[in-house]
Image (cartoon, rainbow, N blue to C red):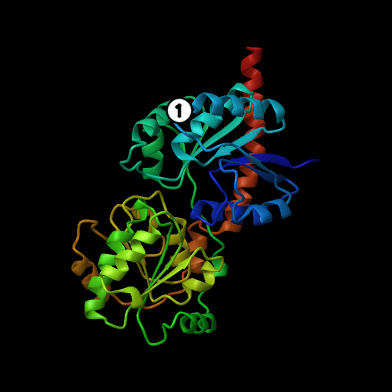
Amino acid sequence: MKPQRVLQVATIMNRGGLETMLINYMRRIDRERVQFDFLVHREERGHYDDEIESLGGRIFRMPAIQPGHYGAYFRKLESFFREHPEYRVVHAHINENSGFVLRAAKLAGVPCRIAHSHLSDLGLDFKLPFRLYARQALKGQPNYYFACSENAGRWLFGRGKPVHVMNNAVNVEEFRFDPDARGTVRAELEGDGRLVVGHIGRFNKQKNHEGLLDIFAALRERRPDALLVMAGDGPLRPAMERKAERLGLAGHVRFLGVRSDIPRLLQAFDLFLFPSLFEGLPVVLVEAQAAGLPCFVSDTITREADATGRVTFIGLKTSPAAWASRILSAALTRQDASAQLAARGYDAGRMAAWLADFYTGQAMAAQESDAGGRRA
């Protein structure tokens, strides 16, 4: 039998948390039963595109979703599903915009349509009216509702929907503490004998790098040996580099850009700092816990993110000095949490097996239900 081809819908398959999670599942899923293909919304190739194709996946490209071009976008979607009647499962990960894809899938008769919420807030910017419109357009298009946390499910779907909270799983064993790697990476970062503060995230407003640099500046007043290491890229990186200069931190901050060795990099940190303005349930926070790190995060992040008891939540409005005090008063020790995370359902291998069962089982059930409804 041919494998069930599942269409995963994303923006671009770069090294973000969601994208890395999908690749982890693709690596581990039984590809004789299930094969992932991807519908993305950028013309340029993503970091994971080569691996997707090497694993047998296909990549289809749509234009970016832009207000004022909805009509053309909808026509492209409808044409795509007419040309690809093989998809019985569409799993959309583009939050409120998932409704646009799932509407076209529904019109094409796709029986299993999954909307997956990965955020718990929209943020305030000029796109907000269009995002609210997209969230309204989502209603009635999916027949399965997934979310990375209860808050993320309520935010996108409201109350009363049968939402399945699906853990943002990682390859737990890959992050297990490695003292040899720790020494090597700390030497590369010039972090020997220093307090190494780590952060991983795209440089956009949501991740609150402004606040992160303020917290680190307060931390350095009490620990002059502290070093901040930030992995990631994005539109706000140049502004944050300038801010580090203004605060006199330039020689104490490492801007690493996008990294492909996150498990290795996490070994070098003494703590993980993550003061985001809003999140769903960040994959990188699960990875940091898998590496045994104490984590200090904003209280806007769902308490569900603390899978190990190693996460300290601090008010987003708390002063940078108070953040620094909380951090330095904590026990900054590592703890092997791999077994704990696996037991809590955060292991990518176990979640990939669950997904294979869901995709193959629910696609058939939805197809039979749809056929029964038409006969009635």
User: Of residues 257 and 298, which is closer to you in this image?
Assistant: 257
Residue 143 seen in the current view: no
Q: Quadrant of the N terminus?
A: top right
Q: What is the residue that sits farthest to the right in this orientation?
A: 1
Q: Is residue 7 left or right of residue 125?
A: right
Image quadrant assignment for residue 131:
top left
Residue 371 seen in the current view: yes
Could you tell me which secondary element the residue under label 1 belongs to?
A: loop
Q: Is residue 30 left or right of residue 323?
A: right
Say which residue label 1 marks: 68
x and y percent of residue 172 in the render?
54, 65
Q: Is residue 32 above or below residue 346?
A: above
Q: Is residue 242 left or right of residue 105?
A: left
x and y percent of residue 103 in the render?
54, 26
Q: Is residue 315 above or below residue 44?
A: below
Residue at image coords 40%, 57%:
203
Q: What is the residue that sits farthest to the top in this orientation?
A: 376
x and y percent of residue 139 in the render?
45, 26
Q: What amino acid type should be assigned to the residue bearing mark 1?
A: Gly
Residue at image coords 63%, 35%:
89
User: Of residues 181 and 240, which is closer to you in this image?
Assistant: 240
User: Of residues 29 and 298, which is closer to you in this image?
Assistant: 298
Q: Is residue 183 above or below residue 328?
A: below
Residue at image coords 56%, 36%:
63
